[in-house]
Image (tube, rainbow, N blue to C red):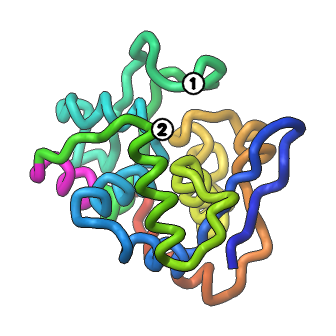
Amino acid sequence: MIVPLSINYGKRVVAVLSPKEWVAIKKELNDDYKMRFEFLLQTCMRISEAMYISEHPECFREENAAIFLPRVEGMGKLRCKEKSRQIMLSPDGIAAVKALYNSGVKFKAYQNMEQVFKRAAKDADFDIKYITTKCLRKTMVSWLMACYPEQQEKIAFSAGHDYNTMRQHYLTFGWRKEDVADMRVYTKGWGES
């Protein structure tokens, strides 16, 4: 069950995955791409931000369970609300960041990442109409909001948004109980330093 986000006048509809759907797609990826996409999911980062962070391990603070993303000219979206931010992590997020750094795997160009992700989704028998690498970022924000609604401001800031932007473009509701139970496994300990 892919739960698409609502369309935003002229914007593309992007799928938000359940944990089971994410696992199905992840099974179709090779180890390097599994690592890259798990990093993107766990950090809620844009690919350009992930490229920067992968080259700057000094931004990662394991003891704070966070990545401190500085303001870097030309990085991120032009209309991005927060140009620098503290990206909160769960223990799984910390593990994903450490795995990427320890492996030496680098991020590929956005177009390459997009093609690989769509191919994996297609191999997992998904209609790829709404599948894009953006869906990982939107997926984790929706999971965090389903599991930690009382931390909406912290989630928004960590993702680089204000609450209104997050609510308008990122949130999906109507999850099944078993989906939320699986989300709690992925997000357990998020934002706790």
Q: Label 2: state its secondary structure.
A: loop
Identify whether 109 is placed above or below 28.
Answer: above
Q: Mark 2 points at which residue?
A: 46
Residue drawn at point x = 22 percent, y = 48 percent: 63
Q: Which amino acid does label 1 sit on?
A: Lys
User: Which secondary structure class fits the magenta region best?
Assistant: helix
Residue drawn at point x = 54 percent, y = 58 percent: 140
> What is the magenta range?
94-103
Residue drawn at point x = 56 percent, y = 84 percent: 181
Circle 2/circle 1 CB separation < 8 Å? yes
Q: Where is residue 17 in the image (x, y as percent from the top left)?
A: 60, 68
Examine the structure image and report whether residue 21 is included in the region drawn in magenta. no
Q: Name the residue under label 1.
A: 77
Q: Residue 31 lies in what quarter of the image? A: bottom left
User: Residue lying farthest bottom?
Assistant: 178
Q: Which amino acid does label 2 sit on?
A: Arg
Neighbor class of circle 2 (other Cα within 10 Å; few <14, some 14-19, many 20+) is many
Q: Position of residue 190 (x, y in %)?
A: 44, 60
Asked whether, in this view, residue 29 is left or right of residue 73, the answer is: left
